[in-house]
Amino acid sequence: MKSIINKLKKQFHTKTFHYGSFSILLTAVVLIIAILVNVAVNALPTSLIQIDMSSSRIFTLNEQSVNVLKNLDQDVTIYPLFETGQEDETLMKLLDRYTEQSDHIKVETVDPVANPSFTSGYNASSLQTGSVIVESGNRYKTIQSYEIYETSYDSYYSSEQYFDGEGELTSAIDYVTSESLPNIYYTTGHDELSISTAFESALTKSNYALTELSLLSAGSVPEDCDVLMILSPQSDFSAAEADMVIQYLESGKKAYIQTSYLSGNFTEFSRILSNYGIQSSSGIILEGDSDYSYQENGSFLPYIMPQLQSHTITDDFIGSKKPALISLACALELTDVRSSVTRTTLMTTSESGYEKTMVNGKLSTAEKEDGDRTGTFNLGVLAEEETASGETTQLVVYSTPYLTDDSLVNYYNISNLDIAVNSIGYLCEHESTVTIDAKSMMLETITPSTSAVNIQTIVFIVLLPLSVLISGIVIWVRRRRK
């Protein structure tokens, strides 16, 4: 027995035991460190441990979203509706970014199959798996799954999918935490253009309430109207209607107007504009500088790419890759008016602009001819006047009926829609206006040049294997000599 114990003692003093014990201890330390590092990393914000490698930066919050979240002063709960184990990874990763930005944001995933009665409390029986409910206090907003993932089709019927999770979520958070929402009334009864689908969607997404207004039926502009919208009337206002609009504006209110060249009798509508020193011309403005015009194949009239003038409304788009693009614009003349009215130009042609006069409602040519009026023409104007009560009347006028036309804003990468929404936001002083574009989910392939391919071939197929082979031979020779 004693010999067995002695043998065991000797085993504890051998080099093998010492090396083995050290290896076990070292392995344990490494495992403990790895576990601690893993725990620490998991405790870090998602933005620090997961890099947004998506081509359109799907998981990187827009500055508007960051500002909305930082300014939150009340709790918001977001309920994504997913069956357990079938959560949308893209949406859930984005929601992680929201919870990181604000302690007021809480995300609770709800399984609509296991808890079918949950959505009934939100009067949203049509909500399906993949939809989201955003709630704060007594106000909530629902986001349908098809509003998060949008599909657009071009003229060749090819499709592209867009992810609008951020735009919809930030808009919903802004909605449920806003004390009041700006009211926009748009006039009817004068063959006005309908609000384009894109413009209506953008305004709704920015949490504006849109209401149709017949001035003759209402008898006046409603008191809760924050912005009166008039979209290119094709028939004149009555004297009574014009008086209502002028009275509304002179009380320190706001209006957004899109007009066009006026042919025929528009005495009363013109009176609204002239009260603030603005007059629409009766011709069509074109651009003589090819750097500021664009003509689509087969089109008769080229588009104008107006020069944006510095102002809060336009500053974000001056020099950007998203130019404005307008057509069928007229000139906005600045006429004599009382000194209390100030006019600020928002967009113009270049000094090579020219005006074509319509004959019987038609143009014989779009080319510049002798006798055409030339120069720099105003295409967008802001008029402002402080009233005796201290309120400020503000009137934004654009000289084209198609600033927000669907066929333009959906087909071209332009800033028209953003400028229009910014104009409304400026008039309403609605600082949290949400104008976050949907982000493309199309994978962008990298196509290297021929020279780059050749260099990569030489490096990875020739030089790298050759260097490994030479290193191996050198090491082998050195060992043989020892």
Image (cartoon, grey):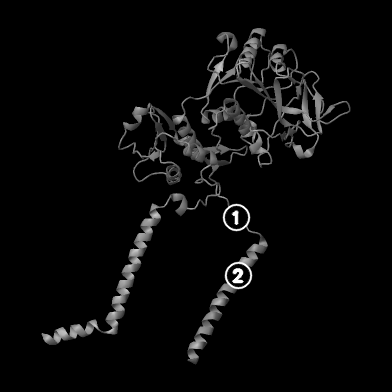
User: Which residue lies under the disc numbered 1?
Assistant: 446
Q: Is 22 displayed left or right of 250 in the figure?
A: left
Of 388 and 274, nearer the camera is 388
Q: Amino acid at mark 2?
A: Val
Confirm whether residue 219 shows in the render.
yes
On the question of residue 414 being in view, the answer is no
Distance from Cα at disc 2 to Cα at disc 1: 19 Å
- Label annotation for residue 459: 2
x%, y% of residue 12? 23, 81
Q: Residue at x 74, y 12 (%)?
A: 265
Kind of residue sitting beneath label 1:
Ile
Q: Quadrant of the N terminus?
A: bottom left
Which residue does the image show at 79% across and 21% down from the upper left? 358
SS for dot 1: loop
User: How far across and how far down the image is residue 339, in percent?
Assistant: 73, 19
Q: Position of residue 340 (x, y in %)?
A: 70, 19
Mark 1, other Cα within 10 Å: few <14 / some 14–19 / many ≥20: few
